[in-house]
Image: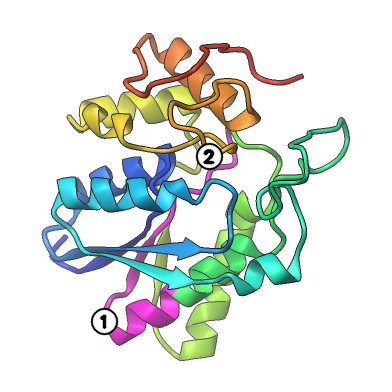
Amino acid sequence: MTEKALVLFSGGQDSTTCLAKALSDYNGAITTIGFDYGQRHAVELEQAKIIANLAGVPFTIIDMTLLSKLTQNALTRNTIPIESKDGELPNTFVDGRNHMFISVAAIYAKQQGISHLITGVCETDYSGYPDCRQDFIHSLNHTLNLAMDTSFVIHTPLMHLTKAETVLLMDSLGRLDWYKESHTCYEGMRPACGKCPACKLRLKGFEEAGISDPLAYETTVSEVPG
């Protein structure tokens, strides 16, 4: 495509894959946007800058620290231990995060004359977050178009991919080396802890894909929690 696209970019594995795919799919300008919401793993934004530089695309960070004042959870409070209990949402779920991020990205995109928004949400290998579901994305896409009288298209290239399939996609795009700079660890550690739910899910994906993760880990436990 020759149209411009905006990638919601955290510097994580999924958004890094989305950036690589956008560069492959679009001939027009690609730009990226990230959000500082007081996350305990704020180092992801520093890694996002590095990857955006590797990709040769602009990266803008938006201050969304208001979100951390509205909701208390394990991602906005490093004093809360990361937990996942059977039958409950993980306490790493941030109420309204994707809703707010995509909405703010849409406002930013409209000012830039961009109608294509790309986000790495996925309902296949995910932690039960309701704002990663396709139904939510479709609903928000419709709402944003009504709210701003425009024609945004929210793209979710990873929506139905497992983590292993995401790794294989990145490999096919020839950008697997970018994963070395990506950040997944909820604890904000580099080398990554290898033990938090996000690290375990990532490691499981690489194991199932039969590819070594170029990211450095303190430990390499590959089992998912539960």
Dot 2: within a 10 Å radius of its alpha carbon, few (fewer than 14), some, or many (20 or more) residues?
some
Task: Residue 85: give x, y in percent of width and height.
Answer: 85, 32
Q: Secondary structure at mark 2?
A: loop
- Colouring style: rainbow
Q: CA distance from mark 1 to mark 2?
A: 32 Å
Residue 58's place in the image compared with 23, above or below, is below
What kind of element bears circle 1? loop
Q: Amino acid at mark 2?
A: Gly
Quarter of the figure with residue 173: top left
Query: What numbered label is drawn on residue 84?
Result: none
Classed neighbour count for the residue bearing mark 1: other residues with Cα under 10 Å, few (<14), some (14–19), many (≥20): few
Residue beneath disc 1? 112
Q: Residue placed at 31% from the left, 86% from the top?
A: 111
The span picked out in magenta is 105-124
Nearer the observer, 159 or 14: 14
Location of mark 2 (residue): 188
Disc 1 marks a residue whose amino acid type is Gln
Q: Is residue 141 visible?
A: no
